[in-house]
Image (cartoon, helix red, strand yellow):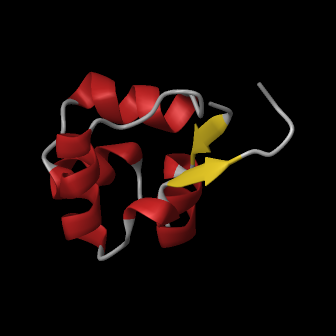
Amino acid sequence: MPMRNKIRELIDSRGISIYEFRKRTGIANKTAYDLYHNAGQYPGPGVMEKICQAFGVQPGDLLEYIEGEG
């Protein structure tokens, strides 16, 4: 399925570092960096829940469907 994560956009729009992002969410360092640097990596359900809780966003704010790719 042609999708991408929008974690980089979330982090950059909030003006925080990846370090601050992972501290607020409680996710692993490698996971935070991988999600930020690789839009093709999707957060698992547990990680997505932590991000949504920490930043008050919905899952649809974290993933984007890219029509015509795939």
**Residue 35 image offset from top left, x and y in percent:** 44, 34
Based on the displayed image, in which of its 4 quarters is residue 44 positioned? top left
Q: Quadrant of the C terminus?
A: top right
* Residue at 34% over, 35% down: 32
* Residue at 44% over, 34% down: 42
In the displayed orientation, state which residue is furthest to the bottom.
56
From the viewer's perspective, tell me whether residue 3 is left or right of residue 5.
Answer: right
In the displayed orientation, state which residue is furthest to the right.
68
From the viewer's perspective, tell me whether residue 49 is left or right of residue 4.
Answer: left
Q: Quadrant of the N terminus?
A: top right
**Residue 19 image offset from top left, x and y in percent:** 30, 44
**Residue 68 image offset from top left, x and y in percent:** 86, 38
Viewer-proximal residue, 20 or 56? 56
**Residue 60 image offset from top left, x and y in percent:** 48, 63
From the viewer's perspective, tell me whether residue 9 is left or right of residue 20.
Answer: right
* Residue at 58% over, 28% down: 40
Number of numbered markers: 0
In the displayed orientation, state which residue is furthest to the left.
26
